[in-house]
Amino acid sequence: MRLRIAESSNDRAAELLSAVADEAVAAGAEVTIGPSTAPQSAEEVCLFVPVAADADPVNIPSEPMRSVAICIAHPGTSAFDVSTRVAGSAARAVDLTTAGTLEQRRRGVRAERFRLGLGERWRIPQPSLPADRRCDILFVGQHSPRRERVIAANASGLAASRSAIHLGSPHSGSPAPPRDAARAALFADAAVVLDIHPFRPHGIDWTLALQAIGAGALPLFEHVLDPSPLVPREHMMVANGDQLATIARGLLNDPERLREMSQGARRLACEELPMRPSVERLLTMAEEIARGARRRRRRARGQSRKAATPVVSAPEEPPALNEDLRARKLAALDVIARRRLARERDLGERNRSLAMHRAHESPAWALAQPNVAVCVPVHDDGSTAVRALESAIGCAGVDIELLVLDDGSADDSLDRVVTWLERRPHVAGSVIASPVNRGLGAARNAMLAMARAPYAFMLDADNLVFPKALRRLVDALEKDPQAVFAYGLLERRRGGRSVGLLSAGPWEPARLRSGNYIDAMALLRREAVLEIGGFAESLALYGLEDFDLWCRVAELGLHAQHVPTFVGRYHERPDSMLSLASIDVSDAVRELRERYPRLAPDIPPSGGRSNAA
């Protein structure tokens, strides 16, 4: 029996197909994995997973009647509708769930239930105990807006644990989440594995469940339908989406129960959920299809083959330039420039210096030997700056120095920060005051130049850093001495609630062509950043100073390290620089095109708006 398995860029489909291929080979089949080309012989039958997404057109076999479709989408979703439509053109179809099988039959598809099982590919012979693993909580999966919101809602609990979040990029052409050996290593090193539904709660994700169980980890699901034969609280845990991290940490605090549940799930999977019988049934189907193809071969020889049409979403056209939005941004920038000039003129008339000066230095400053400088620019936001500083001194595992630059505040921000630092003489802190608002880029560059530590963490006054974040970022840079900076996931909040993520994707220079996806809250290798010119100080790049720096890193062939765990919390405000920078980026794009020609071909044209985070 010859089986051609059509490769897929969907991570869930790819893992499933690889597991089926291994079992088919063990059962004596001749298996080829590759593109869905025409059958090479009358004996060959194609096995494929119908998937529809921007980044992964459906890999429909060129001869659908010589194929078997494995359907993995849940009923009630648009993906299931596409999957069913494509499966209807195949000779046979199987579905991972009972509900999906019944719904496909109702729609006229010749479908059978395919019970996914535990095969050798997903089984570790002697897994370590959950308590001995280096990762407490793991998530691996493709990006979806819902997954982003759920992960953000669990930010605090994930940040307090040894978590790893591998959320695939939503952008076409970006690398998929870890696969094959890399993915298996992640599961083998995790105690608890999260399953977060991409759209809304549905049936159990058996691919993820069996990978976790086979590796000795415990799966933690959002509420699911029909998990049988797994029993909640015996072989798995279930929780509401916003309670996943809380339930996981409760399990981690009870290692004996965690061990019993994970071992019980593994015993059940080995005894009641073997993969081989299901794969043998697939091979029987394939043999029946091949026999039918041989009988029809002479008749089919004279017929033209109809090529299947891939199901893809039409690319979105960039919106036309909105002159009103551009006028709003230019007006806002004009106000900033006028205020700066007015302040300089006023100080000049009063014979006051425009130079920056040191407003306060704590007793601990001179004796400190820091390895991380936390740099906090402040402009009329003293109350939030104090909270940001509180979060910084709560970071463990590093020796920090606090550098605060008051950038021409018109309120009592400078006094608030100085008072806060005076009450903490044990904290190594220095406050610099600029009588004129010089802009975020200039403020950050000034602090980079004044810092003494080899690493500098950029912390805006309205954001927070989690206690274990700096140590994790330092570790990343120490493991990769060539990396210019390191960054991790940020919980994005608006109005006191989680609304999504920032900095969730790995370092991908090509992705910068579509806009900024990395926030400035990152740990910089200080001398390396200064050597390549620091942050942009041009008013045309107002609010995009960090984007300019990341583009320069990419243009020079340098790189960054992404730490797949939470490092901080980003607070959105209507008057924030991000909000202003996002109004219109046409002028900024023109300047970026001139600065970085290697990235320029795909940077959004001046007639469109960036999808900057």
Image (cartoon, rainbow, N blue to C red):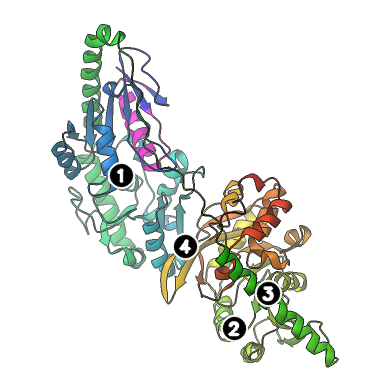
Question: Where does the magenta region start and end?
Answer: 6-31
Instruction: Reply above or below: 510 against 533.
Output: above
Q: Residues within 10 Å of mark 3 (few under 14, many from 20)?
A: few
Amino acid type, mark 3: Asp
Q: Secondary structure at mark 3?
A: helix
Q: Earlier in the sequence, mark 4 or mark 3?
A: 3
* Depth check, front residue: 87 or 22: 87
Specify which label sits upstream in the sequence, 2 or 1: 1
C-beta proximity under 8 Å, tags 4 and 3: no
Q: Nearer the viewer, mark 3 or mark 2?
A: 3
| 10 Å crowding of disc 2: few (<14), some (14-19), many (20+) | many
Q: Nearer the viewer, residue 275 or 261?
A: 275
x, y (%) of residue 478? 65, 57
Q: Which mark is residue 334?
A: 3
For residue 396, the mark is none
Residue 289's x, y, as percent? 23, 19
Q: Which residue is mark 1?
A: 79
Work out whether residue 134 can be spotted: no
- Residue 93 at what x, y percent from top left? 23, 31
What secondary structure is marked by label 4?
strand
Splitting the image into 4 quarters, where does residue 549 fall? Answer: bottom right
Where is the N terminus found, in terms of image quarters?
top left
